[in-house]
Image (spheres, grey):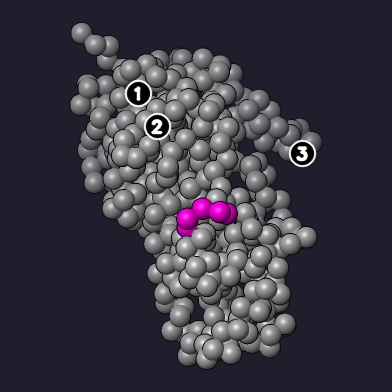
Amino acid sequence: MPKRMKICINTGGGDAPGLNAVIEAVTMAAYNRQWEVYGIKSGYAGLLNTDEIIHLTPEKVDGIASVGGTILGSTNKGNPFKMPIANAAGEWEERDLSDKVMENFRRLRFDALVAVGGDGSLEIAHRFAEKGMPVVGVPKTIDNDMGGTVITFGFDTAVSIATEAIDRLHSTAKSHDRIMVVEVMGRDAGFIALNSGISGNADAIMIPEIPFDIEKVCDKVMDNELHGRKYGIVVVAEGAIPMGGNVITKGSGEVGRQHVVLGGMAEHVAREISKRTGKDSRSMVLGHLQRGGSPTTFDRLLALRFGAAAVRAIEQGKFDHMVGLHSPDIALVPLGEALGIHKRVQTDGDTVLTARDLGICFGD
C-alpha cells in the first residue's frame, strides 16, 4: 500500500488572488489520496509557534477557490533565517531560527511542505530544502516576475483590475481635459503596467526596464493636444526609474520587511507634467486593489492546477522543485534554477513593439 502522507502548506509574501484556490486544490488532492493536510499560518510562524497550525479538511476548504486572500494568512517579514527579535535593550536584531523550524517540522512528523510564494518566499523554501526539508514550491506573484513559469496566478486578476480602472479614468479625464497618471504595482518588472496600459489605451507607459525622460512624456502629451486630444492617460509602474534618477520610496518600511516600500512615482510624474506643460494633472495609486477580490477564471484555474500538481510532485518524491506553467502543461522546475531567473519585460519583445506601433510613449 502507498504510504499515507502527512503534509502541510503555507502562504508567504504579498497576497494574490488565487492563493485560496491553491489551498483548496492541495487539500482535495491530498484527501483523495487519504493523506492528512495541515495549514501553517502566517508563513513560517506556525512552525515556530505550533498553535498556529490548523487541520485542513474538505469541509474547511469547500468553495474557497473563488475567494480572494488566503485563509492561512501571509507575511513578507517572517524569514526564519533572519527573524527580527527584540533584545533585552529593546533593540531589534536578526536571529536564525531555522533550526527550530526544522525541529518542529520533524517533531510534528510532516512528510512534506507545499510552500506558496514569490521569489523571497521560495528562496526561504529552497534554503529549508537544503537543510533537509522535503519542499515543493508553488510560484505566486501579481508582478509575474518569477522564473520557471510562463505566468503566475494573481497576475491576470491584477491586470484586469488595473485595466478596468484605466477605462473608467478616460471619461473623467476627457471631461476635464486632464492628464491622469495611474500608478500600478511592479517593483522590478513592468508587466502589469505594460499589459494594462496597452489594453486601456494609455498614451504613455513607464516601466522599470525602460528608464524614462519626463520631457519625452510631456512631448507626447502636447502632441496629443495638437491633434485635438486634450486629455491623456499615463500608466506608471511603482518601480519605474527616471533617466539618471532612482525609484521613489516611502522609507525602509516595517521591521523585518524584505524590501523597502515603493510609492509616489505617479505623484512625481503628475507634478512634473503639470509644471512642464501647464496641463491639469492628477495622480491615482491603485495599490492593494490589485491584490484584492475574487480571482479571474484564468487565475483560479491556474492556481488549482498548480496545487494539484504540487501534490503529484510530493507523490513522485520531486522535492526542492517548483511547479510552473510551460504551456500547455504544468512542469516541475528545480527551485534553484527558477530562482536564478529574474524575469523582466523584454524591451524588444512583441508586446513592447505592439505598444510602440500603437503610438504609446515609453519616455525613451
Q: Earlier in the sequence, mark 2 or mark 3?
A: 3
Q: Earlier in the sequence, mark 3 or mark 1?
A: 3
Q: Main secondary structure of the magenta part?
A: loop
Q: Which residues are magenta?
A: 347-351
Give me the C-alpha separation between circle 2 and circle 1.
8 Å
Give the label on residue 272, or none: none
What residue type is disc 2 on?
Val
Q: Which residue is mark 2?
A: 323
Query: Residue 339 vs residue 57: left or right?
Result: right
Discs 2, 1 touching: Cβ within 8 Å: yes
For the N terminus, the image quarter is: top left
Q: Nearer the viewer, residue 84 or 364?
A: 364
Q: Position of residue 178 (x, y in %)?
A: 56, 85
Q: Position of residue 310 (x, y in %)?
A: 35, 29
Q: Is residue 348 magenta?
A: yes
Q: Earlier in the sequence, mark 2 or mark 1?
A: 1
For the C terminus, the image quarter is: bottom right
What residue type is disc 1 on?
Ala
Give the label on residue 91, or none: 3
Q: Nearer the viewer, residue 278 or 40?
A: 278
Q: Residue at x 71, y 36 (%)?
A: 86
